[in-house]
Image: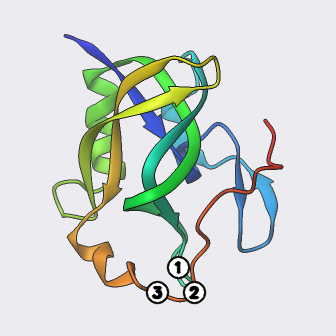
Amino acid sequence: MGSKNLFVYGTLMSRYLDPRDEEIKKHRRSEVLKDLEFEGALLNDYKLLWPDGLGFPFIISFEGGSVKGEVYYAVSEDIVKVLDEIEDVAGGLYQKKVVEVITDSGEKVEALTYIGGESLQSYRNSSSYFTVIPEEFEK
């Protein structure tokens, strides 16, 4: 079985800033990635949305935008299958896409990520969302 890189943002990160209460948290969903090597990364031409009423964020394509997150290395197919279930890919909540991210060490890396699927598109123009995890957020 092959492995791939994975870019995550929001609740799959090792720690994330929850914009609803501005607290740094660790979600149980991220446990599936806990033993893997990772570093910070930036995904350009996307934006992160966290609409009121949703307990999780998602990203959409957005020219000129950027999303801060983490890139995990050597993610096995078995872990990807677990993440597909968590992200409800089969049900259309998220879609998988290969993107290019820039790591904190300056490398350009291809990585799989999960973008908002069909059922999340109704939130795409919502006026009540948070677009980025703030710059001052540190690991």
Determine crowd level at label 2: few under 14, some 14-19, many 20+ residues with C-alpha closer than 10 A.
few
Determine crowd level at label 3: few under 14, some 14-19, many 20+ residues with C-alpha closer than 10 A.
few
Position of residue 24 measured from the top left corner of the image (x, y, whole percent): 79, 53
Residue at left offset 33%, top offset 55%: 115
Q: Which three-letter amino acid code belongs to the residue tagged 1?
A: Pro
Position of residue 133 measured from the top left corner of the image (x, y, whole percent): 67, 56
Q: Which mark is residue 126?
A: 3
**Relative height, residue 38 to residue 133 (above, below):** above
Q: Nearer the viewer, residue 29 or 131?
A: 131
Q: Which mark is residue 51?
A: 1
Q: Are marks 1 and 2 in contact (CB under 8 Å)?
A: yes
Where the N terminus falls, by quadrant? top left
Q: Which three-letter amino acid code belongs to the residue tagged 2?
A: Ser
Position of residue 105 measured from the top left corner of the image (x, y, whole percent): 63, 17
| Element marked by disc 3 | loop
Q: Are marks 3 and 2 in contact (CB under 8 Å)?
A: yes
Q: Are marks 1 and 3 in contact (CB under 8 Å)?
A: yes
Instruction: Confirm whether residue 138 shows in the render.
Output: yes
Q: Which three-letter amino acid code belongs to the residue tagged 3?
A: Ser
